Image (cartoon, rainbow, N blue to C red):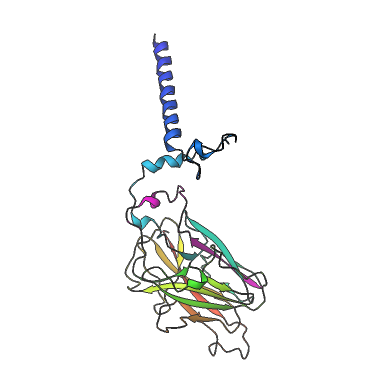
Amino acid sequence: MPKIKGISAFALQIGLYLSVLIWMTVIVAEPVPGRSSLSDADDDSPLSEDYWFSPPKVWNFRRHVTRAVAASECWPRVKFGLLESSAGCPNGAWKSGSVRHLLRSTSSVSSQNYLKADIASDSVTLHFCMRDTEPSENLEEFDCLHVVNEPTFPPGSYCLFNGQRPNVYERCPAGFYWSAVGVDDVGHDGNRQYGADRRDIPTGEFFPTFSHYYFCCRNDSSPSEPVTLPIAQSFILLPLNSERKCQEITGVKARMFSLFLDTEGESYFGHPDKQSAPYAATEVVIEGGGSCSGDRYGKGLKLHLCYYSKS
């Protein structure tokens, strides 16, 4: 009898498991877009294997059991970008891309380097993490898609790369103002002429010998006042030129380092319309402003960067 009871208990467990599996398949699986019922198909056309349901994804079940998540755990769903750190892009809905600049061999990163950059004798390739405003439902950001209060950027003193299209580069997230940095390449790169359809690099204008990067900066609170941003992964922000100090962020340590781009003499930084507007902490080390006269070797742009990590 104990053996029979054991078999019955095992059979009961198998039956319950199959019942739950069938329930999840019927309730959780999603119809393929554009086909809501059998009547949508041609009577004579064979039904493909994926006609009724999308490929099974275990995380779809979490749609009904989403945990409570604070907005501080999620990046705002607005268009912006970050320089990619040596730790990579944050998990979730980000697009990664790169831009190559033909520069002189003295281009470099400070001794403490937290930046993902390819520095060669004649070029520097910068890598970016661009925020996708319509993230797919992935494990890393599933809960963020269902957060009650949409996250926003807090007041502070810091800059982001703009993620808008070139013709609307002046549009920044609420509380930010736009500014620009121009990189005057030494050489001619015929392949670097990106269109407005690029979504994996910052908003800008990219030509074979010159590039304009657009930023979104804010200066509505002291950088010494800690703010809350997602800190699950390391990331990089740019400080304001007027402050030259990293914005304090709760739960992480800020380390300032620099990137030197040995450009030609026409590089620039600032706001073309309002000199008082915030802009990235960029030192122009070109003697005589934007003058093209004289020896330009060793002159260019020095960008100050802030790396944030838990350790």
Q: Which residues are magenta?
A: 121-150
Q: In the rendered image, which quarter is residue 11 located in? A: top left
Query: Does the magenta segment cover residue 65?
Result: no
User: Residue visible at 33% across and 71% down?
Assistant: 224
Answer above or below: position of 263 versus 30.
Answer: below
Image side of residue 245 versus residue 163, left or right: left
Answer above or below: position of 265 versus 229.
Answer: below
Label count reads: 0
> Quick one: quadrant of the C terminus?
bottom left
Is 127 in front, or is 188? 188
User: Residue visible at 33% across and 54% down?
Assistant: 70
Query: Does the magenta segment cover residue 135?
Result: yes
Is 30 in front, or is 287? 30
Answer above or below: position of 59 versus 306.
Answer: above
Residue 84 visible in this rendered orientation of the protein: no
Image side of residue 212 versus residue 60, left or right: right
Is 155 in front, or is 119? 155
User: Residue visible at 40% across and 20% down?
Assistant: 12
Q: Residue furthest top?
A: 1
Point out residue 114 in the picture as x, y percentages from the top left corner: 51, 65
> Quick one: quadrant of the N terminus?
top left
Q: In the rendered image, which quarter is residue 252 located in? A: bottom left
Image side of residue 270 versus residue 156, left or right: right
Point out residue 118 in the picture as x, y percentages from the top left corner: 60, 66
Residue 141 visible in this rendered orientation of the protein: yes
Point out residue 3 in the picture as x, y percentages from the top left corner: 42, 11
User: Residue visible at 37% across and 69% down?
Assistant: 174
Point out residue 61 in the picture as x, y percentages from the top left corner: 42, 39
Is 251 in front, or is 64? 64
Answer above or below: position of 298 versus 218.
Answer: below
